[in-house]
Image (cartoon, rainbow, N blue to C red):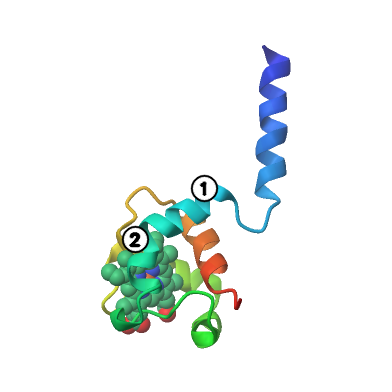
Amino acid sequence: MIKKFSAGLLLVIASSANATDDYSKELYELYCTACHAVAASGAPQSFTSEWEDRLDKGITTLVNNAINGIGNMPPMGTCAECSAEDLEDIILYMAQEQ
Ligand code: HEC
């Protein structure tokens, strides 16, 4: 039993070392693409340079603004199940230029 638990723990540690885990990508797809992949929404578009100026504010500010909402963006970006850490992961993911 203990052995099983520690193996699971190792898995968790290993997966959090990835740049963006599948869970964060799933949350992004579910909640954020509605605006951040639709130019007409006015939201900074994922995987473009539109994030450059935003990132200059610092990740802590971006996470707080995502939690509280900003401009036309609703609080939590509609993802009620997201933690602050999830939001940070998602923001760093969609702010990458690809
Ligand atoms: C209903 C549309 C909508 C959804 C859904 C949405 N956003 Fe946004 N988001 C916006 C808009 C519009 C802006 C630009 C707001 C502004 O600066 O006036 C924005 C801006 C942001 C910013 C930049 C904040 C800043 O300080 O410049 C972050 C970070 C962000 N969104 C994260 C997210 C995340 C993470 C999700 C998914 C959990 C999400 N958004 C879902 C519309 C949305």
Residue at the spot 67% in from the left edge and 11% down from the top edge? 1
Frontmost of labels 1 and 2 is 1
Q: Is mark 1 within 8 Å of ligand 1?
A: no
Residue 94, percent from left and from top: 52, 69
Q: Is mark 2 within 8 Å of ligand 1?
A: yes
Amino acid under disc 2: Met
Residue at the spot 44% in from the left edge and 79% down from the top edge? 45
Instruction: Please indicate whether residue 74 sits to the left or right of residue 12 in the image.
Output: left
Question: Which is more toward the observer, 37 or 9?
Answer: 37
Residue 19 in sight here: yes
* Quadrant of the image where one finds ligand 1: bottom left
Secondary element type, mark 1: helix
Mark 1 or 2, nearer chain start: 1
- Compared to residue 70, the image places residue 15 above or below, namely above
- Compared to residue 97, the image places residue 84 above or below, namely above
Q: Which residue is mark 1?
A: 23
Residue 90, percent from left and from top: 50, 61
Residue at the spot 34% in from the left edge and 55% down from the top edge? 79
Question: Which is more toward the observer, 48 or 75?
Answer: 48
Residue 13, percent from left and from top: 69, 41
Residue 9, percent from left and from top: 67, 31
- Compared to residue 33, the image places residue 5 above or below, namely above
Q: Which residue is mark 2?
A: 76
- How packed mark 2 is, by other alpha carbons closer than 10 Å (few <14, some 14-19, many 20 or more), is many
Instruction: Please indicate whether residue 79 sits to the left or right of residue 97 in the image.
Output: left
Secondary element type, mark 2: helix
Residue at the spot 73% in from the left edge and 17% down from the top edge? 3
Residue at mark 1 to residue at mark 2: CA–CA distance? 16 Å
Which image quarter: residue 28? bottom left
